[in-house]
Image: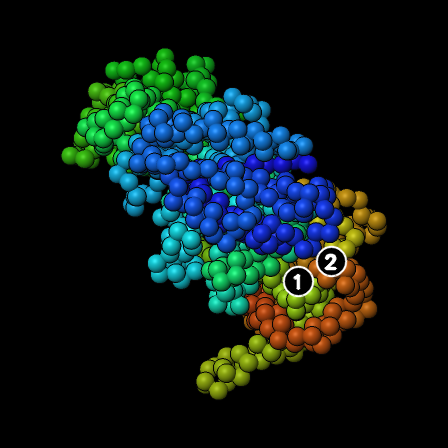
Amino acid sequence: MREAICIHIGQGGVQIGNACWELFCLEHGIQPDGQMPSDKTIGGGDDAFNTFFSETGAGKHVPRCVMVDLEPTVVDEVRTGTYRQLFHPEQLISGKEDAANNFARGHYTIGKEIVDLVLDRIRKLADNCTGLQGFCVYNACGGGTGSGLGCLMLERLSVDYGKKSKISFTVWCCPQVATAVVEPYNTVLCVHSLLEHTDVTIMYDNEALYDICRRNLDIERPTYTNLNRLIAQIISSLTASLRFDGALNVDITEFQTNLVPYPRIHFMLTSYAPVISAEKAYHEQLSVAEITMSVFEPASMMVKCDPRHGKYMACCMMYRGDVVPKDVNAAVATIKTKRTIQFVDWCPTGFKCGINYQPPTVVPGGDLAKVMRACCMISNSTAIAEVFSRIDHKFDLMYSKRAFVHHYVGEGMEEGEFSEAREDLAALEKDYEEVGIETAEVKIFSDYPLQGSVSIRSTKRIFHPSVDAQTGAVALGTGEECGAKVNLGSMLTALAQMVKVPQPAAEPLNSEASSLLSDDPAEFRRAVRLALSGGEVLNVGYDRVLNLKVFIFHFFICGAPKVVAVVPHGIPDAASRWVALAIPVGLSVYAVYAACPETFFVLVVYFIAHTGMNFYMKYVLSQFKVDEELKGMPMAFLLTSIQQFVAFLAFAVFLLFGHIAGGDYAVKRLRTWEERGTLVFFSLAFAGNIGLNNFSLSLLPMSVNLILRSCLPLATALVETAVQGRLSQRIAPAQWILLLLGVICTAVASYCKTPSAAQEAEAAVFSLGLCAAIGSLFFGALNMVLAGVLGDLELNPVDSTGYMALPAGFTLLLPAITTTHPVSPWAPRFPQLTDWQILQEILKRNPGALQPVFFSGILAFAYNALQYALVHRLSATHASFAGNFNMAVSILFSLLIGWEVLPEGRSTMFLLAILGNLAAFTGFTAKQ
């Protein structure tokens, strides 16, 4: 048995303890007199709840706890309360006079008289344990007893039980509300001891708890009882794994192992979800994903602190109730994609999850609703430093005037202890600041390959990786030792800050530059120009930001210098991401516009249509829901077939409204066999492209399929060359090189994007799948080339799309009815089905679910018409290549807004491939 002894100290600790033991008894079915009707085995010590309760020979269950206060009022409430028969009389200890909110009284005078008695009671409880694992200490650091006697107890426990874990549940002083003027003194002195003598400190403050009660429970004027019962729910969730059975139970020592990276960094934030009243609970779906997101909300924190201002080092998430590991894994994966929830870069995992099957219990007549599942999170975050900073400020305000210090000195405390405790807390803040700093290795290079570049003269020695310390030559470092922080990230950050004021004088340099830029920006730029051209130089030291500004100014004002290769090793940090996207995309768009302005509008519209269609289909396929059992869209052939039938209806409606409105649009009639034959082959090529591609997906790994699909521009170029006698456009040798480069970059990006073992597994019929994918590729290329032929036959894109819809739709019906394929989104309910059977199942269960599929048909009509318009204006190869370009830009966009994440282990290769694709398409367009 792994027992834990609870020690409740002071008014706050005893009242929280009263609420906790009330809840523990309800959870285990223990009556207020200690009897447990459901426990038939007298003295049976193997039950999990015996970690917190000991059982007497008479079958009574007694809490393993001690409650102590220096004045009798609060302990007397326990002695005369509902649970008076539950506690052993010797466990309720009280003195005759209180500590008067004075740490020194609780620690040195009044507390010292009672501490030996308390330790004797604790020793008796420890002797009754077969395997004591640690102590849970409950106190409030703002009062005299909780802080003074609490710290004295912790110091003595460290001496007597040095190897046992000590977790403290500490009520912190509030930012705005205080019960005593000297709370800042007591808190700083208490933290000084908590640092040395606890392994984990879990913090609360009343102000945060008041706000949660008002906002979530609609309690206009919360009482201490409301607050204590909320704290009790949290402590119950944290200790549930000790008292009940579960799938992923967490031992008390595991909190320390998983949450504390360094011994001093052990102050924890806590949050709990759902905190909800019974009236609201009936109207909300409290899924695992929702409660997981809720515990990360700043408003859910039990201390007034915003975790978005810091970084998480570790999170321990304790689930209880109807929760399975699969749902927890999915929720945690979603959390990791959120840009507002940041982790330090030196902690690869960051999450410790525990699951206990016992659902939360609520106190009858209490505020919280009875729910099926709940989550409690303890997190170690650098944001806790702002809590220390607030208390430091209050402490400094009083201690600078030595206010109230005489009360402490009069109780036997030395004044030097104030300064020592304050310095210790300042060091703790510094520790939290340092662990949150990203680990970026910066090296100073002296051997620069750049020769004859601009020289910068400075009155002070230059120390910056982009500026040679000897010659002042501006260069970017090369080689793998130069990461994104040194090269791409720093350059883009400087570009983003170019219009801002330089670093303040406290840096301590740049005072002259700062004043000059604010007084006369033109003169500042002139001075920079002179510095770069070898003339006069600003009388300032060149720190990191100003050196980068000098480089940027030179780049834009004096002409681009020779720049050696920039080797990015990851995407730039958050402040630079928009700039990182804007530069390659902006340069590409500008180059396309400058080279061929007449095609610019069509390319932009095609990009919008292509990206919108991809995002919408991705949403439909992932979010499609028939009912609670069947989720996801597993149709393959029939999905495209339905889209084509809807596209034909959209074409018919377009013509009908055009006729009613009196428009002069007329469909071109197919009068010759050449036109009819071309249109039939055009439709069959479209159906063959879609059908064979869907067929190959069940035979090939996804990565192979994506790599082959990225070769569509090359296949289109080959087909276009084969029939070039029929077409006027020809592809120049330079364009072939750029096309090949772009295809290779897209293939590499596809390879990087699908690295999982499941996708790389060998397919059973790889050869057949490969043939189907290649056939699909050339059918797609033929479809694009024939779109150009139809353009030469004066069939406009709208007509081509409308005429193609019915033949393609009917052609795809055949495999939709006959071909059985795996239905992974609906497994294991339906392992394999035809598309026709899938449609029947949807119509039987929820026909309305098909609405987004019908809408996708309208989007498909618009997208295909725009695609063929691009073929008519440019060429089939150019339009296919534009598709790869669109995919590259949309991936960059998805990375920036957090829809996608960089592939692990291949981020550099992936980003370089994307940028290479953009550059190749830009060059191809300029040549065209």
Looking at the image, which is closer to me, 169 or 490? 169
Q: Residue at position x 38%, y 45% from top?
A: 73
Quadrant placement of the N terminus: top right
Q: Secondary structure at mark 2?
A: helix
Q: Residue at position x 48%, y 29% from top?
A: 117
Report whether residue 378 is seen.
Answer: yes
Looking at the image, which is closer to me, 462 or 204? 204
Q: Quadrant of residue 305?
A: top left
Residues marked 2 and 1 touching at CB (< 8 Å): yes
Position above or below: 119 against 716: above
Q: Earlier in the sequence, mark 2 or mark 1?
A: 1
The x and y percentages for residue 775 are: 75, 55
Label for residue 632?
1
Q: CA distance from mark 2 to mark 1?
A: 9 Å
Report whether residue 199 is seen.
Answer: no
Position above or below: 63 against 429: below
The x and y percentages for residue 322 are: 64, 56
Residue at mark 2: 824
Kind of residue at disc 2: Ser
Graded by Cα atoms within 10 Å as few (under 14), some (14 to 19) or many (20 or more), the crowding at tag 2 reads: some
Kind of residue at disc 1: Gly
Q: Residue at position x 63%, y 61% from top?
A: 621
Q: Quadrant of residue 172?
A: top left
The x and y percentages for residue 636 are: 71, 63
